[in-house]
Image (cartoon, rainbow, N blue to C red):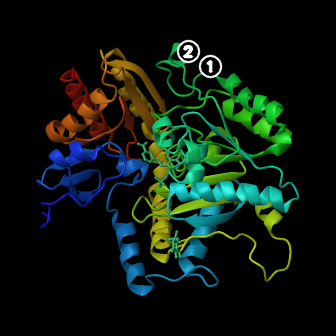
Amino acid sequence: MSAALTNYDAYWMPFTANRDFKKKPRVITGASGHYYTASDGSKLYDTFSGLWTSGLGHCHPKIVEAVQQQVASLDYCMTFQVTNDKAVALADRVTSMAPDEFTQCFFTNSGSESVDTALKIALGYHRARGEGNRTRLIGRERGYHGVNFGGMSVGGMVPNRKVFSANLIPGVDHIRHTLDLEHTAFTRGQPEWGAHLADDLERLCALHDGSNIAAVIVEPVAGSTGVLPPPVGYLERLREICDKHGILLIFDEVIAAFGRLARPFGAQRFGVIPDIITTAKGLTNGVIPMGAVLVRDSVYDAFMQGPEHMIELFHGYTYSGHPVAAAAGLATMDVYDEEGTFEQAGALEQHFEDLLHSFADHKHVIDVRNFGLMGAIEMAPREGAPGARGGEAHKKCFWDANLVIRNGMDTLQFSPFLNSNPDEMQKSFEDIRRVLDTIE
Ligand code: PXG
Ligand code: PLP
């Protein structure tokens, strides 16, 4: 039990209803494997793998040991002008898991930083090639690309943008999202309907002239907005249009990478290869904050011009390639290999899909969506109180069912451990069903 848990006043929580939370705080003080320990000593099953982060479970001994050793031997060193052995090794390791063309890895500290880095690389690439007119960026409605100004601007989550509307970066357009319950409700995996929505990109090329567009960024499976798997043929079509117009395709794989789609990268699962891939979360199993942007050799090569003593990209973070984070990343990759984690994840997909879709007959449920080990159960909003049902489900699961679940408004999102025990997974959904039964 932690000592000083009496005063919550100073703590401004991210993406949380602060006043409601502080009336009856939910505080985690420990974790092991698939369970959290709360401040009252109760054990809770984690249905969200941290925040899509911790696919191997919490406090994996190999990662813990690697971090302990690293922090005691090299705690920090700058990676501007000198660097550390762990960052170099992790760049090599991660690119070796990526599609062949991806030879370069730039480190960040989060998904948001990865996204802003990727957008800057895309703009720099075109300028380096003498196409500095290519400045327009294209995102997608309902996309989530983090909370920094670049990612927020290409993102399409209305509440995240609303307050900052006048300050979003200029020259950004959005293609439509792919969710339409009339055509896609209760689809298992990728919907057959919707590939034509990729043609929105062709329309934007017609409107602006494709030669002015730098990059398109999409999540291969939209996560944060409530899990929207891409329609069959959709990502292929985006790739085709990008190729036709010389536009870079960025896959934001902050959630999708490192096993959630049973492969190192979502690009490999879909067989569609982008030009830049953004990652974070599963890179270190969530243990130490870290992100990485993977870049095709052709994009990197465009920067490697001019005098060799000159910096090619004026960008980087104090903690880019932090040795302790990189050590956590290396240990995480070792565990993925040694334990066959991505195969384990693949073997759980059918069971997970069946459990999710067993909610199709529930009175509140209007859609169920899944792909890989990403899943969502969407409930109808309560009249006049959107989000209330989802919020209540979260709190009741915590207090009454010893479960940590994640809701975005009235959509419950699921990110099971990549090495889940099928029976524990099943029990968690049975418990959630009982909770939903008690909610108005
Ligand atoms: N891109 C994608 C695709 C993400 O999912 C980010 C960027 C930003 O990463 P950072 O590390 O800056 O948070 C994310 C993060 C949810 C949820 O409830 C998902 C995220 C963040 C917060 C909530 O699904 N993903
Ligand atoms: N603000 C100031 C005053 C700084 O000196 C720095 C970094 O040196 C930053 C912001 C950026 O911090 P970071 O590199 O951790 O993103």
Q: Position of residue 244 (x, y in %)?
A: 85, 38
Asked where in the image residue 299 lies, by quadrant, the reply is bottom right
SS state under label 2 = helix
* Amino acid type assigned to the residue bearing label 2 in the image: His
Question: How far apart in space, not on screen, are marks 1 and 2 (Cα)?
Answer: 7 Å
* Amino acid type assigned to the residue bearing label 1 in the image: Trp
Tell me if mark 1 has few (under 14), some (14-19) or many (20+) residues whose alpha carbon lies within 10 angstroms of its own. Answer: some
For residue 227, say whether it is visible.
yes
On the image, numbered disc 2 is attached to which residue? 183
Are the two marked residues, 1 and 2, in contact with CB atoms closer than 8 angstroms? yes
Residue at 81% from the left image edge and 56% from the top image edge? 126
Q: Position of residue 116 (x, y in %)?
A: 60, 56
Residue at 81% from the left image edge and 70% from the top image edge? 304
Residue at 27% from the left image edge and 40% from the top image edge? 424
The numbered mark, 1 or 2, whose residue comes first in the sequence reads 2
Q: Is residue 247 above or below residue 9?
A: above
Q: Position of residue 138 (x, y in %)?
A: 69, 41
Q: Is residue 87 above or below residue 174?
A: below
Direction from residue 330 to residue 275 in the image, left or right? right
Tell me if mark 2 has few (under 14), some (14-19) or many (20+) residues whose alpha carbon lies within 10 angstroms of its own. Answer: few
Q: Quadrant of the C terminus?
A: top left
Q: Position of residue 309 (x, y in %)?
A: 79, 83
On the image, numbered disc 1 is attached to which residue? 193
Direction from residue 155 to residue 13 in the image, left or right? left
SS state under label 1 = loop
Q: Is residue 258 above or below residue 421?
A: below
